Image: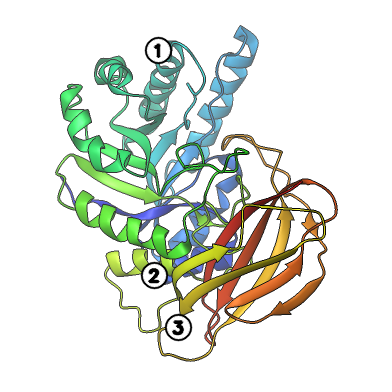
Amino acid sequence: MPEQWQGAAFAGDRAALEKLAAAGAGVVRVYGESDAWVLDAARRLGLRVVMGVSVAYPLDAGALHAQEQAVRNFVERHRKHPALLAWGVGNEVEAGAADPLPAWREIDRLAGIIKAIDPAHPTLMVAVDGGIERLKVLATCCAQVDLLGINAYAGAAFTLPQRVRDAGITKPVVIGELGPLGQWQAGTKPWGAPLEPTSSEKAAFFRDVLAFLRNQPQIAGAFPFLWGAKQEQTETWHGLLLADGSLTAMSDALTLEWGKPVAEPAPAIRGIGIAADEFAPGQEVSAGVDAASFDGTALRTEWKVLAEATDLRGGSGIETPPARIAVTVLHADAASVRFLAPQQPGAYRLFMTIRDHKGKAATANLPFLVR
């Protein structure tokens, strides 16, 4: 098998794409037709593109025909682009279906159409990591698909190569989205708020899992999720960058994996804590973070309180960011904060963004309840 694809799943602007190339990535995965601008930008930056093709299912006959025609037109338009590496046909199209096979058959049909138009580029389908029985179905269902993509998070990424073999899958496998502990996997507070890993914990995951996957011969590539920023459960859970484009410990870990040195690493978070889980309205809240810069220089921390997110879409669709809550701050420095709890009972999170003098960032948050 050729050398593994090295890159990331991407959603961002041109500046973020430039940072991805500067970090040493060779490949970028994008999700749909609105990302076609990445092809020209990637060519200038020396990147290759796994170009996403949007697929919806189920649809009525008329909509299926219209979708097929749109796919044909899109592939015809871009099939000769020099930055094109492969076609990504859909993403988790079967999610939520009791029986994934009808959706997968439609993806396979579209992949065959794409191959007929453009035999020079392989087809990739990307599925949910749905367990061994679904993997067994994937082993036999999709002859027109050249590479099988599976999205895997946390410990599932370490077990995936063996599970793929156990299921009888012989095609090359790409981890279409590779991420640390997802909100659906994480432990929760008693009121249901999932506990997000710190940026340092996420970076350690990427370091360890990419080292492991490097030695798995059936793994054709892995795309850490997501080079950019995304509101999903929180504003920081899945983004490898901050919304302002700041680099993080996660982007450092990928840079090292892709063979580039990191002379000035992002701040490291060694611990976080809050005085209690629950507070009365207006009660004093104290919290702290133990963090260090790469060179021992002073850090600065932005503290903010947000309402717990309620517009949760499980990765599909655009979530509405929760409101920032104005609180009375009694004291704040790089390591600690004291403030008065909101007057309105409810679920909240205290977010901390720690920056060094180079502008690199570390992130963490602490859920708490007011009642």
Q: Is residue 364 above or below residue 331?
A: above
The tag earlier along the polypeptide, 2 or 3, is 2
The extreme right residue here reads 343
The tag earlier along the polypeptide, 3 or 1, is 1
**Residue 258 visible within the image:** no
Rendered image coloring scheme:
rainbow
Task: Identify which residue is drawn at 28% across, 64% down.
Answer: 257
Disc 2 marks a residue whose amino acid type is Asp
Task: Identify which residue is drawn at 63% across, 62% down.
Answer: 351
Residue 365 shows which numbered tag?
Answer: none
Judge by depth and name the residue closer to the eye, 353 or 220: 353
Disc 1 marks a residue whose amino acid type is Leu
For disc 1, the marked residue is: 101
Residue 293 shows which numbered tag?
Answer: 3
Report if the CB atoms under discs 2 and 3 are less than 8 Å apart: no
Task: Identify which residue is drawn at 58% across, 59% down.
Answer: 365
- Disc 3 element: loop
Task: Identify which residue is drawn at 53% across, 63% down.
Answer: 241
Judge by depth and name the residue closer to the eye, 340 or 72: 340
For disc 2, the marked residue is: 252
The quadrant in which residue 61 appears is: top right
What percent of the width, then of the height, locates residue 32?
Answer: 55, 40
Foreground disc of the pair 3, 1? 3
Q: Residues within 10 Å of mark 3 (few under 14, many from 20)?
A: many
